[in-house]
Image (cartoon, rainbow, N blue to C red):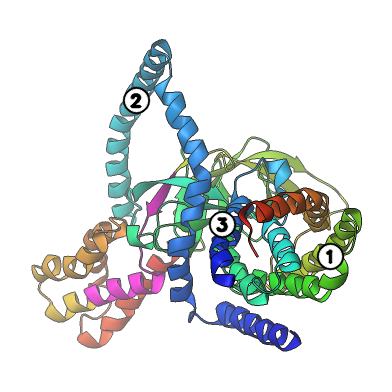
Amino acid sequence: MASTRSNNGWIIWLTFAIGLLLSISPMPQFMEILRPLWLALLLAFWTLYMPHKVGMVTAWCLGLAEDVLYGTLLGQNALILTLITFLVLSLQQRLRMFPMWQQSLVILVIFGLAQLAQLWLSALTGNRQPTLALILPALVSALLWPWVSYGLRGLRRRFKIN
Amino acid sequence: MGVRLLVLVVLSVALMVVDARFTLLKPVRSQMSLVLMQSYWITDLPQRLWQGVASQFGSRTELVADNEKLKTENLLLQGRMQKLAALTEQNVRLRELLNSSALVNEKVEVAELIGMDPNPFTHRIIINKGERDGVVLGQPVLDARGLMGQVVELMPYTSRVLLLTDTTHSIPVQVNRNGLRAIASGTGNPERLELRHVADTADIKVGDLLVSSGLGQRFPAGYPVATVKEVIHDSGQPFAIVRAVPTAALNRSRYLLLVFSDSRTPEERANDAAKAQEAEQNGEAPPIIPATVPKPAAPVVVPAPAPAPVATPVAPAVNAVKKPVPAPTPAAATPPAAAPATTRERQ
């Protein structure tokens, strides 16, 4: 059964590739600060609904790719994305039962924590962000979560990925 | 699950430490960037396509007007160039008289911007020239109006440029009007630099042009950096607050110039000069000088026709002046060799 249905697994990787592109796509200056954490959103969705396929190792590899793209220390974003995936995985049973707004709230908390860890790591390397505006991407991501979630669920149903 | 998390966390921390402290991971990073940096090119594609379409459908009158404008501009620049050649020659000759090597024209190469750093708190851009194109770490980057920044990360076909206005960047400058030296630090605002530790009584005015001073050995001297926008004398502050606006269009320029200047460090430059002089003194035969000196200079000239060719005519001049003063024995060969070395280093 797995062999007949799993051939659509490449869709997952396609969404990750699009996520990587979105996370570096040029934006107007004032919107850069609001850029959602696309990769983290996608990872959260796929780990929530397909924990047997996407896990912490995937998150770690994607984080490394992001590090190369951003020019940060190798392992910085990898660590952050692994932490996010771990938190989502450990809350997975409960999160799937939650209504959408409650999921958004949990996502906000998880991403906020991740951004704080990000601040801490970049402070270690000397690139300290001057403000707490770094929480804003977490907020934007949480607001985007319902749409991303519905969209990806539709995609999953359409291509019968599981 | 907990074990996997622990392993991955430890692995990432180890990677971060190794990446920060050693150069061990540089090849891995450059291999990964070979594939991944294509995505910057992809995200730049819509812009590129739009430009292509716009140029396809540009009206004829517009093109003619553009052409006209460029022609007049070219004529003006050519006119100025004619004078520049003469002035450069004169400058070189005067500097020879002063016993100092001049900066001759640096070689430049055009690069194109292909991406911005997604992190809004850092000012970095990605350009489409990399290690394979001969770009080196720390290389200065200009646009048509002034200095933009320096190369901080090399990848095979792309590189990352740190802009002047990044909070971690500072550049030694001097006021073009009177040569007053200062350090311009980035503020994180793309339209502002700040001069740190300028004395309250310093002669610096609004509208002054700040040019790179060449101290710090990173940026070539004499390129415009910023114009002073405001000078605030606050009696409660120990120093004057001086704010300047970068002359380069840091967040608008799409075509940049990479400057290839002398790749040797000041020590190497001094050593080369000293060696050339020693060889000349040991030989004691003037005709050998031109034969021995250009040899070490020749491979350097390829990327950088900077001070090297000028330094060669200077060396015999130094000797001609200095030989009668100390005893011309081989034992005294070291002091005159050391003296020009220190002066070169300061340039």
Q: Do circles 2 and 3 both sit on a common chain?
A: no
Q: Give the secondary structure at mark 1.
A: loop
Q: Three-letter amino acid code at disc 2?
A: Asn
Q: Position of residue B42 (x, y in %)?
A: 49, 48
Task: Identify the subunit bearing mark 3.
Answer: A
| Both marks 1 and 2 on one chain | no
Q: Residue furthest front?
A: A1
Q: Is residue B272 visible?
A: yes
User: What residue range appears in magenta?
Assistant: B256-277
In the depicted structure, whether residue B330 falls above or below residue B254 = below
The spot of residue B8 in percent (x, y) is 66, 82
Amino acid type for the residue under numbered disc 3: Leu
Question: Camera-side residue: A136 or A40?
Answer: A40
Taking the image as shown, residue A44 lies to the left or right of residue A91, namely: left
| Residue closer to the observer: B249 or B1 | B1
Tell me which chain the residue with mark 1 is part of: A
Q: Secondary structure at mark 2?
A: helix
User: Visible in this render: residue B138?
Assistant: no
Please tell me whether mark 1 or mark 2 is closer to you in this view.
1
The residue that disc 2 covers is B74
The image shows residue B75, relative to residue B191, as above or below, that is: above
Residue B228 spot, x, y in % from top left: 65, 40
Q: Which amino acid does the dot numbered 1 rest on?
A: Arg
Q: How crowded is the residue under tag 3: few (<14 C-alpha within 10 Å), some, or many (20+)? A: few
Reading the image, the residue beneath label 3 is: A14
The C terminus of chain B - image quarter: bottom left
Sequence order check, earlier mark of 3 and 1 = 3
Distance CA(mark 3)–CA(mark 1): 24 Å
Quarter holding residue B11: bottom right
Name the disc covering residue A96, or none.
1
Above or below residue B216? Residue B210 is above
Label 1, label 2: how far apart the Cα atoms are: 67 Å
